[in-house]
Image: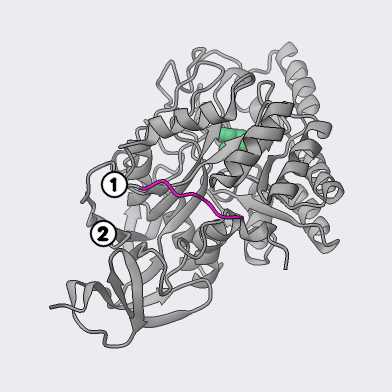
Amino acid sequence: MAEFDMVVRGGTVATAGDVVVADIGVREGRVVAIGERLNRGETEIDAAGKIVTPGGVDSHCHIDQPMADGSVMADDFASGTISAAFGGTTTVLPFACQMKGQSLRSVVEDYHRRADGKTVIDYAFHLIISDPTDQVLGQELPALIKDGYTSFKIYMTYDDMKLNDREILDVLAVARREGAMTMIHAENTDCIAWLTEQLEAAGHTEPKYHATSRPSAVEREAAHRAATLAEVADTPVLIVHVSGAEAIDQIRAAQARGVRVYAETCPQYLFLTADDLDMEGFEGAKCICSPPPRDAANQEAVWTALTTGVFHVFSSDHAPFSYADDKGKQLHGKGASFSYVPNGIPGLETRLPLLFSEGVGKGRMDLQTFVKLTATNSAWMYGLYPRKGTIAVGADADIVIWDPDREVTVTNSALHHNVDYTPYEGMKLTGWPETVISRGTIICDGGELKVDKGRGQFLQCDQPGAVRVG
Ligand code: DUC
Ligand code: ZN
Ligand code: ZN
């Protein structure tokens, strides 16, 4: 009888700490041995010449999220998680989003119904808190944190979501007391509203003006304020989807003062610029997301911050709205003002290959940093480490085997999401996930899905690593 259910043999195994050539022995869905010349496995995978990383953890994505404006996301939990899996991600943390007036518990139940029986990889939920009533903060949220929903996002902008500073402090106080992580969307809402009004009054409504309506200063101010609120409330925050140098400077300065401010960035801030919103006709709507992509100098600042410890996680912020869809980017037609275009771009499947090719492949970051940013820190940040985010004895056997030499031209028809475009169409990448393993089961291999939907498991999150003191 074989000693292991599976052995991944002879790959270059990268974790956040090391890069070693080793065999990985898997039993009952978990890693049980890492070493040389391991005994035989029931399934043997030859990984010689390949790079082996922990399965990616995408800690910021939107899947099948009902929207207040009537737009509809193109991905449900089947297409979203299948797409993530093909891109080397084995755990996702989408949001269960509270609309004003809703009970958080009923929101969570709704999202479970949406995900049940559909996912091919494991998942946990962050909450979005848009209505911090006494009942929500005093009863529902503490109970949900105890049940494994240990992180939540709050917004400084969007009329149906935004909280004022006082409300943010109230939420942070609960996070501190209960040991949860607060993610903050940092943009100054009044500046955006004022600029939008000015632009629209002048007839400047094309997609490119989305970027004009949300300049870096708007994000810089909000990042500074988010750090200040974290300092006042004495609890960590994570500023999500940071787009460029000005917000980065605020975050770095707060970190240097000893304030526990963590930060996330996303592929769109490395690979897109505001010029991508200025495409022919209405096409720029494809790249409308918030904060908007900036320019080449800001892209460089984001690269630098990724490799100097300012950023902790690299997530997709996948928000799937199809372009040629009257429930997607064209919700109000092709002539609509930028302010009516649903915000967000797809990215679950391309997140890891983009960073692998352009980060590791081009020598901008080492493999350990790649793993840290895309898997280990994301798991640690949200209470899933060490079950997820690493290759270690006892961890779930979530493993990606990369062909580091495979050349791929990104094209939407080869992706598995349900969105009708990718912003990265035509990009030439080197390196792609060849085999993806989740809890010891091969789920994608050679471009084929090997499992049925519904095998993914819901994960209850522990207290986030970043909020533990001592
Ligand atoms: N911005 C967000 O805040 N959320 C979804 C997508 C986006 O662009
Ligand atoms: Zn956001
Ligand atoms: Zn988002």
Nearer the observer, 414 or 137:
137
Residue 291 x/y as whole percent = 65, 37
Name the kind of residue labelled 1 in the image: Arg
Element type at mark 2: strand
Q: Position of residue 195 (x, y in %)?
A: 77, 23
Q: From the viewer's perspective, is residue 257 above or below residue 325?
A: below
Q: For the N terminus, which image quadrant?
A: bottom left
Q: Is mark 2 within 8 Å of ligand 3?
A: no
Residue sitting nearer the eye, 162 or 71: 162
Give the left or right position of residue 435, taking residue 379 as reference. Answer: left
- Residue 17 point in image, percent of width and height: 53, 76
Q: CA distance from mark 1 to mark 2?
A: 10 Å
Q: Which mark is residue 251?
A: none
Relative to 119, 168 lies left or right: right
Query: Is the stretch drawn in magenta largely helix, strand or loop?
Result: loop
Secondary structure of the residue carrying numbered label 1:
loop
Residue 455, disc? 1
| Location of residue 219 (image quadrant) | top right
Which of 315/335 is in front? 315
355 within the magenta span: no
Callout 2 amino acid: Thr
Quadrant position of residue 72: top left
Question: Can residue 292 be seen here?
Answer: no
Q: Give the percent coordinates (x, y) of residue 345.
A: 50, 36
Q: Residue at x 68, y 25 (%)?
A: 131
- Quarter occupied by the C terminus: bottom right
Q: Which residue is mark 2?
A: 441
Examine the rendered structure and indicate whether residue 305 appears above or below residue 68. below
Q: Which residues are magenta?
A: 457-463
Left or right of 213? Residue 268 is left
10 Å neighbourhood of mark 2: few (<14), some, or many (≥20)?
some
